[in-house]
Amino acid sequence: MKSKKTSSLRWMAIAVMLTLMTFPSCSQRAMQGAGRGAATGAAVGAVGGMVTALVFGGNVGEAAARGAVYGGSTGAAAGAMSGAVADSNQKKAQQAAELEALKKRLGDDAFNGLAALVECKHEVAQGYGRTAAKSNNPDFALAGLWLQVITFADSGQEDQARALFPDLVAKDSKLSSESQAETEMQAALQKLMDIRQEYKLPKDCS
């Protein structure tokens, strides 16, 4: 009888230990997921802000900073959910609404392509860029064209990026020459790498 009781207590102790070990592990995974999600979300928001400035005009750096704020909380919330813990406190309605507004300005295809670009998924980004560039909405089409240019440059295919300059100059009234398009492309490429580095993502895709 005593042996059975001792055995039962032993198994209960093991169960408690496993429980204590498991919950911190889940919590840690959730925190790591939230951290990754926040970084990626903020980076996507920042790059989206940057492209918004290219399409509509304005200061690229300021637009990128605003976009990072918009993307941070929603990215963190998504990361927490993927890490098995959904923290409703991370879903800040205002920031989520701002990020959605950013998506609406650029169009779903261009915005999704920027998310792929941040993660160095160049083929995916180009696919979204080509689709967006065919949009009947001129702003979405211009965002898609800029997405293609920046993606080509980021993947080391600057000649292919420059091959799109004539279309870019024709469709972007803010550009007066291909040399200006070159300047904007190089600035955007540098800003993209800076954004990745700022949010602890790989700076380049090599």
Image: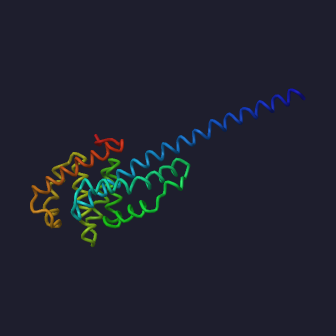
**Quadrant of the image occupied by residue 114:** bottom left
Q: In this view, does 107 lie above or below 69?
A: below
Residue 124, image x, y percentages? 33, 54
Residue 118, image x, y percentages? 33, 50
Query: What residue sits 29% from the left and 42% below the top?
Result: 205
Residue 19 located left or right of residue 4: left
Check the image and tell me how it is coloured. Answer: rainbow
**Quadrant of the image occupied by residue 54:** bottom left
Query: What residue sits 86% from the left and 26% below the top?
Result: 3
**Quadrant of the image occupied by residue 168:** bottom left
Residue 142, image x, y percentages? 23, 65
Observer-nearest of 161 and 183:
183
Residue 62, image x, y percentages? 27, 55
Please identify the quadrant where the C terminus is shown.
top left
Question: Which residue appears farthest toward the top when viewing the image?
Answer: 3
Query: What residue sits 28% from the left and 67% below the top?
Result: 140
Please identify the quadrant where the N terminus is shown.
top right
